Image (cartoon, grey):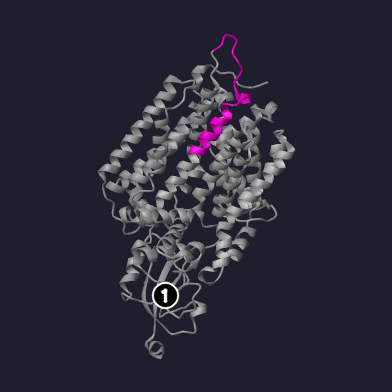
Amino acid sequence: MKPVRLPASATLALPRWGLFLLGLLYILPGLIGRDPWKNDDAASFGIMWTMAHGSLQDWLWPHVVGYPMPEEGPLAFWIGALCIQCLGWLMGDAQAARIASILFFLIGAFSVWHAAYLLGRRTEAQPHKLAFGGQPEPRDFGRTLADGALLIYLGCLGLLVHSHETSAEALHVSLVGVLLYRLVKYIETPTASKASMVGLVLGCLALTRGWVLPLALFIALFPLFLWLKLSVRRTIWHCILIMIIGTATLQIWLASAHFLQPLGSTPFDAWMQWNKEQINIPSIGSIQYFLRYGIWFFWPAWPFAIWAVYAWRRQHTALHIALPLTIIVMLSLLAIINPNQEESFLLPLLPPLAILAAFGLPTMKRGAINAVDWFSVMTLTTCAAFIWIGWFAKQTGWPGKLAKNALKLVPGFKPEFNLIAVLVAACASIAWIFLVHWRISRRPSVLWRAVVLSSGGVILCWLLLTTLWLPWINYGKSYAGVAQQIAAKLPANHPCIDTNIGPAQRASFAYFGALHFAEFHKKTSCNFLLLQDSVKYKHDDAIAPEFQDRQWQLLWSGRRPSDRDERFRLYVRKAPALAHQ
């Protein structure tokens, strides 16, 4: 027996323009008016920037101005590089690269909404017919569930930061949503053309972050199709077609790199090694990491998803339960067997969790919904208030202790008052108050009422951070200042620099300081050396072991004011060595 009984009044859908504006309100703050930030954001931008200003070899062998980066795959970086080439002249290379992040997010949000809509309008998902009529139409029920799935997706805490980075992870999570959408389309009408589209998406997943995840999902498809009682003969043929299309898509890159040998080699071996390192025997540590971080990373999706599985337990063969649950189980297994405890391996779980959670909304008890609402209101309102108080302290110096702690983290930062940012933050805060008042006073019966405060509060806090605190965050995470200091110590046409710095720093220094680094495929001896180490090392003349056989003179030493441990030192080869060359 179906667990859902609903009147038509509970399926009031949000307007399409409202959903689109909500998506833009979510993704645009944090992508505008900032530098590439350290770690993955700057490193991924570096690959895109290198491709955009390089040759075909740089597109086939991903690297950050000479630092090899073949591990994940080139698809996201190809798209980012195209954005730089098309729009870099208009808005700057860093901002143009983030257009790709906006596109990735919109594709993922669109796919989650449409997958939930198609599942929600199916016969087995419909509520019971009421005795005197008045039940919702399948189309209306599907639209309302899709709105709920999108709100849950936007409210997931784990998506927030990663969707605003210039990285392959943003495309990876969106492609999982696209895969779910294409699978629903295929299962509804199993044709060769729709199977080919599934294979194309799996191939794009492999081109984005390796073959482990798409291979695991492909393995899960055959038992899923049989569980759904699709034709065995047709399923076998279509699975073969999916594998052929997916492999052919991946070969666009691998075969080209093999035959053309960009930069004198191929990235295949390094790429395969990175993929193999994603698989290991499950450990206590990986399981603990999954459970400990999953509690907040998947919030608020996981409580509704668990309830959906319980509420629909007698209809476990229904597509709207079987499909997302199969994907969730397989992706959870991948996260557990992965020895690298990183958030990026939890991201692909968000689209299926959001879709499954949407089907828990119609059956949630009023008390449980109110509990989630009050938790969201109390937690997120407190966070928003703290952001406002911290900003006020930073601007005025009162409360003194709070202002001192905020400025202590970024020595040298000078707060500036931005009227537009304050007005935007104030409008967002007022809108939040009206939203909470509407939810508490009217107690609407629409299905998505249970998650509107969670998603709205997350968007509010992020908007406040990226308006009121963006200069402070940018000052602490950007390498622009250090890059300009190093560039000032170098001659205008320096040939190359040997270095041990990582990809994020290399990308930032090349972009902001126009530094030329030694390339991994060329055996060159550079006259300059840039070292990165810790301030804990007391001897300024200490050289890294691989450079100790040379004579160097210290030109400059410095670091970012916000980093108390990291240090950079620039050396030049001493005169006798220069004369010998």
Circle 1 Cα neighbour tier, 10 Å, few/some/many (<14 / 14–19 / ≥20):
many
Q: Nearer the viewer, residue 318 or 419?
A: 318
- Foreground pick, 14 / 266: 266
> Which image quadrant: the N terminus?
top right
Specify the amino acid type for callout 1.
Answer: Ile
The image shows residue 173 at horizontal and vertical percentages of 53, 46
Is residue 84 on the magenta stretch? no
Whether residue 128 appears in magenta in the rendering, the answer is yes
Q: Residue at 57% x, 66% y: name it.
A: 259
Please say if 495 is above or below 115. below
Q: Would residue 171 appear left or right of 199 to someone viewing this image?
A: left
Q: Is residue 184 above or below residue 166?
A: above
For mark 1, give the secondary structure: strand
| 261 to 33, vertically: above or below | below
Q: Identify which residue, 276 or 404, lies in the foreground.
A: 276
Relative side of 319 to 28, left or right: right
| Residue labelled with disc 1 | 497
| Residue displayed at 69% across by 52% down | 282
Position of 168 relative to 547 (above/below): above
The stretch of residues the image draws in magenta is 110-133
In the rendering, at what x and y percent does residue 531 appear?
44, 72
Q: Is residue 17 visible?
A: yes
Residue 528: give x, y in percent of width and height.
Answer: 40, 78
Query: Is any atom of residue 213 visible in this view?
Result: no
Residue for point 56% across, 35% down: 355
